[in-house]
Structures are given as structure tokens and as C-alpha cells.
Amino acid sequence: RSKQWYQRRVRAPPDDLVQLLSLYEETLNQLLEKHCPLKRRRTEQRNRPWMDTELREVLRERRRAERKWRKKKSEENKEEYRRLKKLFNKIYKEKRMTHVREDLLTAEIQG
């Protein structure tokens, strides 16, 4: 910070309350940006038309199996969880690809 900034803001703060609040907000924003800047993150896509009842049911079973495995730590539970995980991933990919193909075909027909 420059000496001039210090003189204007710290030694001689504004008399007006609105200006003082504005200065406070500006300083706070600068400090936040310096010490904890905002980072953009990608979020999971929520619009998934291919997530039908069959897929949701397999997902529920997979989660149930995962909880059981984490609680009991048996090899049998682990294998069941892994089997359901592979099944879910396979069905998910198939349904997503089918949906994408149908979208592309629809776009070709319309365009």
C-alpha cells in the first residue's frame, strides 16, 4: 500500500457514514480477494434424463451395499459392492450414450 492510500484512508477516514461503510466494504473485499480468492468449480450436472427408475434402483442397491461393506468390512460385502458398482456404471454409460445418440439424431432431423 502506498503512503498516500494510508494517509487518505487510515489517518483521515471519511466523515460521511456512507463513505465510511463504502471504504470498509472495499477494504474487506480486497482482503478477502487477497487471502481467500473465489475459485470457480464445476458442479455435477443435475439434468440427467437418462437417470430412470431402473438406474436409480441400482444406485440405491449399490449405496446400500457400500454402507454394509464399510460397516462390516467383510470380503463378501466388498465383492457385492464392487459387482453393483460395475453394474451401475455399465447401465449408466449405456443409457447416457443412448440418450446422446437420440439427441443427435433429433438434431440432424430438425436441422
Image (tube, rainbow, N blue to C red):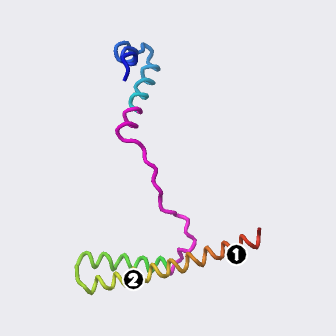
Look at label 2 and name its amino acid: Leu
Does 95 sit above or below residue 26?
below
Q: Nearer the viewer, mark 2 or mark 1?
A: 1
Look at label 1 and name its amino acid: Leu
- Magenta run includes residue 34: yes
Callout 1 crowding tier (Cα within 10 Å): few <14, some 14–19, many ≥20: few
Q: Residue at x 51, y 63 (%)?
A: 45
Helix, strand or loop for the magenta stretch, by majority? loop
- Residue 7 image position (x, y, % from top left): 37, 14
Q: Which residue is mark 2?
A: 84
| Horizontal relation, residue 31 to residue 47: left or right | left
Does 15 sit above or below residue 29?
above
What whole-number distance in Å separates the C-alpha atoms at marks 2 and 1? 31 Å
Whichever of labels 2 and 1 marks the residue nearer the N terminus, that label is: 2
Q: Which residue is mark 1?
A: 105
The stretch of residues the image draws in magenta is: 29-54
